[in-house]
């Protein structure tokens, strides 16, 4: 009989405690100058408001579905704030805060779940792919793009304005998919400039992480031959610091890194899910006490924040901005145009082929007949 694996779990590295106090062991690492903490708090609060309004729109029948990010704001804002303009981000379908930090109009995110867009991506547009719904598919997309960067000579040149990297987001459930493991193999064997940022929110829909792996997600990187880092996903400073290091390592030609941000999905998997069927409200309450926004707010309102210290006026201004954002989301969602039925054909390949042309014509004729019959 083989020996049981070592199941000892290391504590995630953190900089701020849940009470908003710099962790004793991390005092040397705590350098607020590396991250605009005020901007980080603002981005987390506004991302949460986007999430709240989208859920309300879904309940009103304006969206078909919505995957909430509640509780994961620090992981996303921390990681996104480490990305340079020339880097490229490959998200899943829950990275609303990342999209916000990258300057993506949140109304366009609503279009994915309203059915007015099929997605698509222009690499010149903010370096942010507009969501991947198929679980883990984005891991191979990101690795393929990183392969191109390496071959284009955009890695390890020493020029900070030229060197580029790819940041791929995934959930803990994606670690059980074949695409992710294939992506890890390719990234490792070719030393690709890619950082895999896994938000381990404890639940792959209704499957807890404990039934997916016997070791922490970060430790799995070692088996593929590259480093893994485990951080507190509710600590925006720790997430930012870890991602800065990993992306710098990648841009310099050091190869891939897997970051495991230990966090928690406090809302159901999507608006069609009933999470109380598989987990207790007490578990949610446990993580509510570790709320990422509250953690940073407590620090910034303390004397320890120094020049970064905030007051109630600062928070009131953000709340006013959040209200204006909510108004824009509601109006923008309802004003989204009906999709062009020919759009998927025109964007399948770089150039239309005769076969695609004939399929497009047949499809448009079919749609036209259906419209006439429904009148």
Image: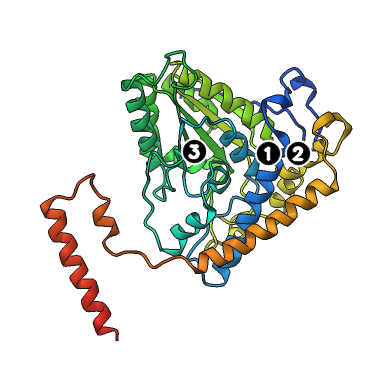
Foreground residue among 158 and 72:
158
Left or right: 275, with 147 as reference point = right
How many angstroms separate mark 2 from mark 1 (CA)?
A: 9 Å
Disc 3 packing (10 Å; few <14; some 14–19; many ≥20) = many
Q: Residues at badges 3 and 2 in contact (C-beta under 8 Å)?
A: no
Q: Residue at x 42, y 42 (%)?
A: 125
Instruction: Give me the disc on residue 29.
Output: none
Give the mark nearer the N terminus: 1 vs 3.
1
- Residue 154: % across, % down: 38, 21
Left or right: 45, with 331 as reference point = right
Give the mark nearer the N terminus: 3 vs 2.
3
Instruction: Give me the disc on residue 40.
Output: 1
- Residue 307: % across, % down: 82, 30
- Residue 102 seen: yes
Q: Residue at x 51, y 24 (%)?
A: 247
How many angstroms separate mark 3 from mark 2 (CA)?
A: 23 Å
Q: Against 105, is 2 above or below? A: above
Q: Kindly state the secondary structure of the residue where label 1 is placed.
A: helix
Q: Residues at badges 2 and 1 in contact (C-beta under 8 Å)?
A: yes
- Residue 69: % across, % down: 59, 50
Instruction: Give me the disc on residue 169.
Output: 3
Instruction: Give me the disc on residue 296.
Output: 2
Foreground residue among 193 and 24:
193
Q: Against 335, is 298 above or below? A: above
Disc 2 packing (10 Å; few <14; some 14–19; many ≥20) = many
Locate the C terminus and report the quarter of the image it occupies: bottom left
Q: Residue at x 23, y 75 (%)?
A: 368
Report the mark closest to the observer, 3 or 2: 2
């Amino acid at each position: 009989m083989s020996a049981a694996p070592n199941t000892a779990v290391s504590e995630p590295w953190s900089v701020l405690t849940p009470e908003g106090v710099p962790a004793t062991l991390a005092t040397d690492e705590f350098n607020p100058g590396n991250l605009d903490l005020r901007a980080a708090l603002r981005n987390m609060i506004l991302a949460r408001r986007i999430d709240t309004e989208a859920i309300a729109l879904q309940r009103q029948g304006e969206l078909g579905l919505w995957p909430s990010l509640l509780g994961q704001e620090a992981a996303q804002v921390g990681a996104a704030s480490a990305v340079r303009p020339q880097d490229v981000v490959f998200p899943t379908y829950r990275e609303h805060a990342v999209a916000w930090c990258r300057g993506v109009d949140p109304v366009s995110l609503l279009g994915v779940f309203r059915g007015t867009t099929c997605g698509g991506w222009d690499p010149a547009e903010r370096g942010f792919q507009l969501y991947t719904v198929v679980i883990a598919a984005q891991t191979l997309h990101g690795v393929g793009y990183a392969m191109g960067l390496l071959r284009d000579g955009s890695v390890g040149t020493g020029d900070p304005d030229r060197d580029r990297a790819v940041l791929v987001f995934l959930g803990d459930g994606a670690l059980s998919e074949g695409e992710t493991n294939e992506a890890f193999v390719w990234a490792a064997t070719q030393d690709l400039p890619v950082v895999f940022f896994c938000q381990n929110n404890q639940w792959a829909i209704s499957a807890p992480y404990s039934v997916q792996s016997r070791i922490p997600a970060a430790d799995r990187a070692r088996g593929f031959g590259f480093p893994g880092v485990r951080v507190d996903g509710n600590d925006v400073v720790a997430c930012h610091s870890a991602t800065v290091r990993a992306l710098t390592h990648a841009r310099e030609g050091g190869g891939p890194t897997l970051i495991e941000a230990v966090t928690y999905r406090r809302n159901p998997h999507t608006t069609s899910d009933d999470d109380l069927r598989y987990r207790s409200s007490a578990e949610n309450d446990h993580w509510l006490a570790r709320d990422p926004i509250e953690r940073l707010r407590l620090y910034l309102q303390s004397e320890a924040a120094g020049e970064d210290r905030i007051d109630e006026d600062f928070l009131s201004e953000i709340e006013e901005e959040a209200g204006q954002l909510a108004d824009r989301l509601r109006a923008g969602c309802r004003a989204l145009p009906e999709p062009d039925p020919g759009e998927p054909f025109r964007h399948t390949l770089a150039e239309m082929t005769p076969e695609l042309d004939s399929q497009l014509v047949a499809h448009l004729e079919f749609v036209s007949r259906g419209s006439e019959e429904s009148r």
